[in-house]
Amino acid sequence: MSKHIAVIGSSGGNLYNQGGSDPKAMMKEIFTQADSAGIEVTFIQFIGAQATMDNISMDTQARLFTLEGGQVVAGEAAALKEINQQAAVLDEQLAKLIDDGAIDGLVLMSSDPKGVNSKAVAAAARKKIPAVGTGGTSIANTQAAGVRVISASGTTGTTNRTRAVAFVSALAKEWGLKYMPVIGSSAAGSAQAQGSVLKRINFRGIMMASMPGFIAMALCLALSKIPGLGGLEDVFNTLIGVLPVILAAIAAKQVSGLDEVGIVAGVIAGVMSTDGGIIGGLISGILAGVLAYYIITFCFKHKVPGTTANIAAGGLAGLIAGFAGMYAIAPVALWFGNMVKTIIEACLTFSPLLAGAVAGLLIWPAIIGGVYHAAILPIVLLEMESTGFSFLGAIDMTGLVMVSAGITLANVLFPRQKSDAAVALPGFLINLGFGTFVEASYPFMFSNKLVFGGAILASTVSGALVGLLGVRGTAYVPSVMAPFLANEGHAVQFAVCMLAAMAVAFVVTVVANRVPLKTKE
């Protein structure tokens, strides 16, 4: 038989600043963790005020949150004095449920055991049911009332997720239930979130989430070339040093699934691993995330208070991963990163035209085959880390973005059928305006071999020009801005490469749209 719990309390004082200001989000985390343990939340009596309850006025607006049909429902806003009266009615109902054996445990968050929760607390003491909760004074008063509190903590340093995990961990252990914390990017949980923490290591997700940092660096470098803005070069140099920290923080957050706690662990690990560059930051961040997950899980299994568990997970995980990054990971990561960049430069030195053509030829098969984000994007970021622009970044912009723009523009102006224009126009505008969404050309490429071949040809030609003209740049920026983010003195050359890619793709697509498609009889 599943166990049934009630959640009672208020948005509190310190709790208000630690998630209590959004009761529905907080309850969602409790529901998620409880469901993972086979525990059912069957009663909610929670007062959510519009301000922290430290020295609060009885005239402050508040709402009473209850459970109706399995959903958390917010009542009408009213003065706190009136809401307390409504809560007192629910307190009597809950006390009866406890006395009748319908409630097996309590979750208390900044509750009022001497006021609106007094009857439920008294019933819990009579029935000796277990209780868990947060709130220093309220928990102390609850214990004084004779309630069997099996897990108690303050709210400082906790999050909605870590509190929910702490509550359910203690209750599951008390009742001998099998429980795997649901720790992932979504409070709704997923199979992946409940599985091995190693399954949450997603290099593509980490790299993509870090892209704004690299683009900010490239923008600062470009702006620093404008007369009077030379001081931004110092900002550029600062950002280069920060990039490993950004990657480490994102990696630790995603892998640990612990939100702020994971971020703290990642920042600590990243700062200590900056000598390893972005690879060092990435690996250290992943390690920090894994350690943070296991440390906090260990703490909760052994009834360590939530605040202490968070400090241990964020601080210890960050330090351990940071020391590993500083003394073991950084030297190897730095060597590997330099080797990759050396190989690219060696290829360009041997034959820039050939290197560019080969890169352009392979980039479409790479993105269609799912290799791009796993192999090419990390190399782009490695190149940008040291200079702010990249050879493969320029290939991306010319061979993918501008080729896609050429294909979609051709289908806007000279479509095979009228409906194609409506499909192609948004893709064309997004490619030009945002420097992404190359997938907009897929319907036309996959339905016509000539268009597909034209895309490969255009990418190869533009890639050869990129290599021949010594262009370095970046993608993921508006196409009109891309030339200004090229290596110094190559803005015009980059624009030429971009226009060439677009022109070849455009012409081949127009021709393809005029050639009748063969149909099977």
Image (tube, helix red, strand yellow):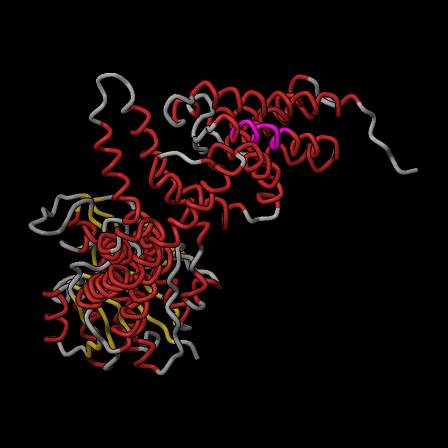
Residue sitting farthest toward the front: 350
Q: Position of residue 437 (x, y in %)?
A: 53, 34
- Report the span colored magenta: 458-466
Residue at image location 53% in from the left, 29% down from the top: 398
Residue 379 place in picture, x, y as percent: 44, 45
Say if residue 306 shows up in the picture: no
Q: Which residue ends up furthest to the left in the rendered image?
A: 55
Residue for point 55% across, 49% down: 371
455 or 115, nearer to the observer:
455
Quadrant hosting residue 232: top left
462 within the magenta span: yes
Left-right relation of 197 to 26: right
The residue lying at 15 percent from left, 44 percent from top is 60
Q: Is residue 285 above or below residue 378?
A: below
* Residue drawn 70% across the image and 38% down it: 446
Q: Is residue 19 above or below residue 99?
A: above
| Residue 233 seen in the current view | yes
Q: Is residue 340 left or right of residue 405?
A: left
The image shows residue 267 at horizontal and vertical percentages of 24, 53
* Relative to 235, residue 115 above or below: below
Depth check, front residue: 190 or 406? 406
Image location (x, y in percent) of residue 281:
31, 53
The quarter of the displayed image where residue 233 is located: top left
Magenta stretch encompasses residue 204: no
Q: Main secondary structure of the magenta part?
A: helix
Residue nearest the viewer, comparing 487 with 372: 487
In the displayed structure, 272 sits above or below 196; it is above
Q: Quadrant of the C terminus?
A: top right
User: Is 503 placed left or right of 297 in the picture?
Assistant: right
Q: Quadrant of the N terminus?
A: bottom left
